[in-house]
Image (cartoon, rainbow, N blue to C red):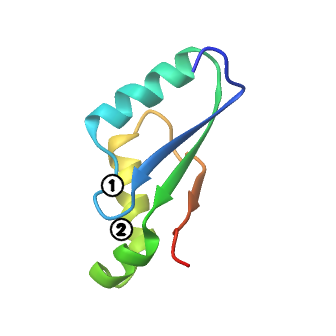
Amino acid sequence: IRRSDLVLLMIDCRTGPTEHDARLLEKILSLHKAVLVVANKLDLAQKEYDEPRKVFREKLDRIFHFYPRVPVAFVSAVK
């Protein structure tokens, strides 16, 4: 993290962020680094939720309350 300019914080889209992820984000921000949350496995989350992006964003806003509207990229590694 210390040597990076941009940190990609990858989180499983099905489970959403955890308290551990929040601690990592706090560390990234304390080092004044740019961060992008990468919500992985969107394809699987779409099978579990009607609106997976909305569900993920709600969890993100709750866990990462100290950084409202953190930037997010939703991805899937499906061929």
Q: Give the mark nearer the N terminus: 2 vs 1.
A: 1
Q: Give the quarter of the figure containing the C terminus.
A: bottom right
In the foreground, 78 or 15: 78
Q: Residues within 10 Å of mark 2 (few under 14, many from 20)?
A: some
Q: Give the quarter of the figure containing the N terminus.
A: top right
What percent of the width, then of the height, locates residue 33? 65, 24
What percent of the width, then of the height, locates residue 14? 31, 64
In the foreground, 42 or 58: 42
Q: Residue at x 60, y 49 (%)?
A: 71
Quarter of the image holding residue 31?
top right
Above or below: residue 40 compared with residue 5: below
Quarter of the image holding residue 6?
top right
Above or below: residue 15 compared with residue 31: below
Residue at image mark 2: 55
Q: Are marks 2 and 1 in contact (CB under 8 Å)?
A: yes
Q: Amino acid at mark 2?
A: Val
What percent of the width, then of the height, locates residue 12? 37, 56
Q: Residues within 10 Å of mark 1 (few under 14, many from 20)?
A: some
- Secondary structure of the residue carrying tag 2 is helix
Q: Residue at x 51, y 69 (%)?
A: 76
- Secondary structure of the residue carrying tag 1 is loop
Above or below: residue 13 compared with residue 17: below
Label 2 – label 1 distance at C-alpha: 8 Å
Residue at image mark 1: 16
Q: Amino acid at mark 1?
A: Gly
Locate residue 22 relative to residue 32 in the image: left or right: left
Q: Residue at x 32, y 84 (%)?
A: 47
Above or below: residue 52 compared with residue 62: below
